[in-house]
Image (cartoon, grey):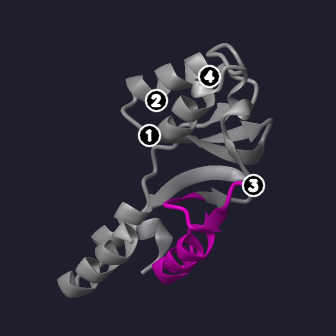
Amino acid sequence: MQISEVMSTDVITVQANHPIRKVAQLMRDNDIGAVPVYEGSNPKGFVTDRDIVLACADENVTLEDQISTAMTPNLVTIDANQEVTEAARIMEEKQISRLLVVDGTKAIGIVSLSDLLGSLENTHLKAEIVEEIKQ
């Protein structure tokens, strides 16, 4: 099964210079917990709601600072034509739960660990994966 069959296609991206406050509001308004961060047309990182909270807990970071101060750099991407097993392998190797799906550098989707679990028909295998994640 290919990534394109399980990915979410409603991708909202932000620019690295956007203020943390605006990105947090965007995430709240769209009920999402993570967004890819771009610099121009190049993907640069990923930021989660948790990243924002942790960054703002730092006394030197404010809601007016650029989102790049809160993002995780070195965004990991995958092509939509890759197999879901490849996405799972990358997530395990990199210890991440989301991948940006791209066509070149253009964001066309996001695939999460939940998306991959949802694609599995074997409930025993799903349970094993969930147990592994807990550890």
**Disc 4 marks which residue?**
20
- Picture coordinates of residue 66, whole percent (x, y): 72, 23
Q: Kindly identify the residue that appears in the image at 74 percent across and 53 percent down.
A: 105
Stretch in magenta = 74-100
Dividing the image into 4 quarters, which one contains the C terminus?
bottom left
**Disc 1 marks which residue?**
33
User: Would you say the residues marked 1 and 2 are in contact, meaning their CB atoms lie under 8 Å apart?
Assistant: yes
Considering every residue shown, the one lying at the far left of the view is 123
Label 2: element kind? helix
- In the rendered view, does 18 fall on the left or right side of 35? right
Of 76 and 4, nearer the camera is 76
Dividing the image into 4 quarters, which one contains the N terminus?
bottom left
- In the rendered view, does 57 fall on the left or right side of 121? right
On whether residue 87 falls in the magenta region, the answer is yes
**Disc 2 marks which residue?**
27
User: Would you say the residues marked 1 and 4 are in contact, meaning their CB atoms lie under 8 Å apart?
Assistant: no
**How many other residues sit within 10 Å of disc 4, few (<14), some (14-19) or many (≥20)?**
many
**Disc 3 marks which residue?**
74
- Picture coordinates of residue 33, whole percent (x, y): 44, 40
